[in-house]
């Protein structure tokens, strides 16, 4: 497998302003053995016409349409249609650096294209143009001996991966199963947790970058409605179904972070998060908070430390809003 086929999977919905730039970032890849699978989820703008104009010029673009079943179903359908050895998910408003696929393929070649090795890279936020993009440097930006080690580091505050930053063997996607259509937030975090529990290596590519577009206010991923925040909590609850006891304490940190952020905004959801920690069989006071907050844990116990941090976070935001 000297030049494995890479499938770029794009869910599309009313992205007429952005889809051309996204497609150009894929078509400009220095690695050429790529197929582009686009699943439109019932767009009412000119998105489909724009994609069809590209189809007329490029034979490696496939367009499929469905009737507003959601982005997760669109991603699943795109995967079903794909033929690639490796899978790269890409939202219709985000961008890839021109060397993204080539750089990660060369890195994976060093591991003989092992079917349980995944690659990821750094990402940046941008508005309108990548010329002023903000690169996100995270502690997690290095390689790991296993996907579980990556998840532990991530859950405990080390950072996270952007959905379009991953290059994943199709075998791991099969094992992960479908995207969860009930989630409105953190769909990618939940999905890739299921991918990574079966990964034996996670390799970091420092030579490429992906770009996440900010400032699209219509997306539920950018709001803080009750349903959106409830969905974040549900995605963390799904982490508990990974059935990896070695991850339990790390998952508890995710619930703690949730409580600190939403204790006063959505107290009933924070209460539910506390109960989920109990279900993990973990005494919350046995966990030490990270960073400078560990001193609060030592002074008052972790549960009181959490309440103090939640209070400060909420009322500081309230005062300056």
Image: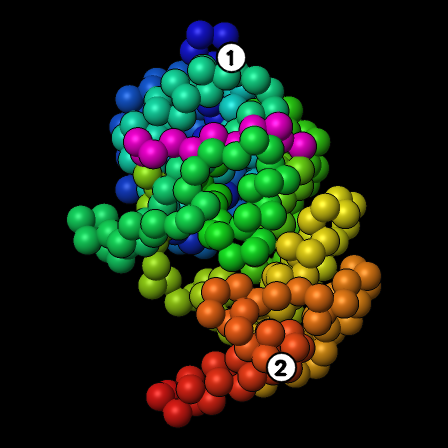
Q: Which contiguous range is marked in magenta?
A: 198-208
3D distance between C-alphas at marks 1 and 2:
51 Å
Residue 67 picture location, percent across and down: 59, 48
Instruction: Identify the element where label 1 is drawn.
Output: loop
Query: Number of callouts in the render?
Result: 2
Q: Secondary structure at mark 2?
A: helix
Decide if residue 142 is on the left or right side of residue 21. right
Does residue 114 lie above or below 209 as drawn? above
What number is the disc on residue 112? 1
Residue 221, position as x, y percentages in the image: 49, 62
Above-or-below relation of 33 to 302: above
Q: Is residue 301 visible?
A: yes
Q: Which residue is at the front of the view, 249 or 51?
A: 249
How crowded is the residue under tag 1: few (<14 C-alpha within 10 Å), some, or many (20+)? few
Residue 312 relative to residue 126: left or right: right
Q: Earlier in the sequence, mark 1 or mark 2?
A: 1
Which residue position holds label 2?
A: 300
| Relative vertical location of residue 312 with respect to residue 60 in this rendering, above or below | below
Estimate how packed mark 2 is, as few (under 14), some (14 to 19) or many (20 or more) residues with alpha carbons within 10 Å.
few
Residue lying at the far front in this picture: please name it: 299
- Residue reaching furthest to the top: 2
Q: What residue lies at 67% left-to-right and 32% top-to-bottom?
A: 198
Quarter of the C terminus within the rendering: bottom left
Query: In the drawing, does residue 315 fall left or right of residue 82?
Result: left
Q: Is residue 204 magenta?
A: yes
């Amino acid at each position: 497998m000297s030049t494995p086929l890479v499938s770029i999977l794009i869910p599309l919905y009313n992205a007429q302003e952005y889809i051309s730039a996204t497609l150009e970032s894929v078509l400009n890849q220095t690695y050429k053995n790529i197929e582009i699978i686009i699943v439109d989820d019932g767009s009412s703008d000119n998105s489909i016409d724009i994609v069809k104009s590209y189809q007329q010029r490029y034979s490696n673009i496939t367009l499929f349409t469905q009737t507003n079943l959601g982005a997760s179903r669109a991603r699943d359908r795109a995967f079903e249609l794909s033929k690639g050895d490796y899978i790269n998910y890409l939202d219709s408003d985000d961008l890839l650096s021109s060397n993204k696929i080539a750089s990660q393929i060369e890195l994976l070649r060093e591991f003989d294209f092992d079917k349980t090795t995944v690659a990821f890279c750094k990402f940046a936020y941008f508005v309108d143009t990548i010329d002023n993009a903000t690169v996100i440097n995270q502690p997690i930006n290095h390689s790991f001996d296993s996907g579980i080690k990556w998840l532990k580091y991530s859950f405990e505050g080390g950072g996270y991966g952007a959905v379009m930053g991953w290059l994943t063997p199709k075998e791991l996607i099969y094992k992960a199963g479908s995207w969860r259509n009930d989630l409105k937030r953190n769909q990618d975090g939940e999905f890739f947790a299921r991918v990574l529990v079966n990964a034996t290596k996670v390799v970091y590519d420092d030579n490429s970058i992906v770009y996440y577009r900010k400032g699209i206010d219509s997306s539920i991923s950018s709001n803080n409605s009750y349903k959106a925040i409830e969905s974040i909590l549900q995605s963390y609850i799904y982490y508990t179904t990974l059935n990896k006891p070695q991850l339990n304490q790390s998952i508890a940190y995710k619930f703690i972070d949730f409580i600190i952020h939403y204790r006063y905004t959505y107290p009933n959801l924070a209460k539910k998060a506390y109960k989920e920690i109990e279900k993990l069989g973990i005494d919350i006071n046995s966990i030490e908070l990270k960073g400078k907050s560990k001193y609060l844990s030592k002074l008052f116990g972790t549960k009181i430390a959490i309440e103090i941090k939640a209070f400060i976070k909420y009322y500081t935001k309230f005062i300056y809003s």
